[in-house]
Image (tube, rainbow, N blue to C red):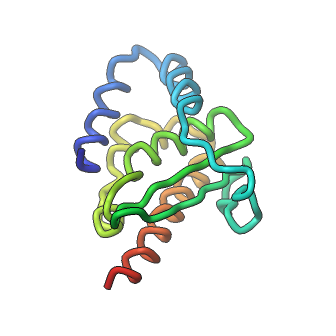
């Protein structure tokens, strides 16, 4: 699936819920399905700067596709990173770099987060794209 197809799937899933309490619960459930980072990668180097909670992200490239694993010490944050990883993992670096993140606004996520969590969300997106840029330069 393309990033856009996955993002549209996420938009459809979030539109099924009546209110934000149900959406938060869904995000918590998504966090439980997150491909977890190995303990050895839970280092300061892999912590996303700008997040109120601790969020670790690790990336590896296999067959010219970037695969992400992550973890967080907060359940909502874990759900947020799970959504992002679902959209961007197992994709070509250039596709990740070029990907639009409007789906975040379409599901209403940014407006329902505290300012510090919203900043953390931006930092998470930026970090995933930075990994993709690093891998893309290796391919060139």
Residue 85 in the image: x percent, y percent?
Answer: 46, 47
The front one of 117 and 69 is 69
Q: Residue at x 33, y 23 (%)?
A: 15
As displayed, is residue 101 above or below residue 128? above
Residue at far front of view: 63
Quadrant that contains the C terminus: bottom left
Residue at far bottom of view: 140
The front one of 63 and 93 is 63
Residue 6: which quarter of the image? top left
- Image mark count: 0
Q: Residue at x 65, y 45 (%)?
A: 71
Q: Is residue 76 left or right of residue 108?
A: right
As displayed, is residue 140 above or below residue 44? below
As displayed, is residue 105 above or below residue 31? below
Residue 1 in the image: x percent, y percent?
Answer: 24, 44
Q: Is residue 91 left or right of residue 74?
A: left
The front one of 120 and 94 is 94
Q: Residue at x 33, y 57 (%)?
A: 91
Q: Residue at x 60, y 49 (%)?
A: 70
Residue 86 in the image: x percent, y percent?
Answer: 42, 43
Residue 13: which quarter of the image? top left
Residue 58 in the image: x percent, y percent?
Answer: 59, 59
């Amino acid at each position: 699936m393309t990033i856009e197809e996955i993002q549209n799937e996420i938009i459809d899933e979030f539109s099924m819920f009546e209110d934000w309490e149900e959406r938060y619960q869904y995000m918590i459930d998504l966090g439980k399905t997150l491909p977890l980072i190995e303990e050895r990668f839970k280092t300061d180097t892999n912590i996303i700067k700008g997040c109120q909670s601790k969020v670790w992200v690790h990336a590896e490239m296999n067959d010219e596709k970037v695969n992400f694993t992550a973890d967080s010490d907060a359940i909502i944050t874990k759900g947020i990173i799970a959504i992002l990883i679902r959209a961007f993992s197992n994709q070509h670096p250039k596709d990740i770099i070029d990907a639009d993140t409007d789906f975040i606004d379409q599901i209403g996520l940014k407006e329902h987060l505290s300012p510090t969590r919203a900043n953390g969300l931006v930092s998470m997106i930026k970090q995933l794209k930075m990994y993709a840029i690093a891998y893309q330069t290796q391919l060139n």
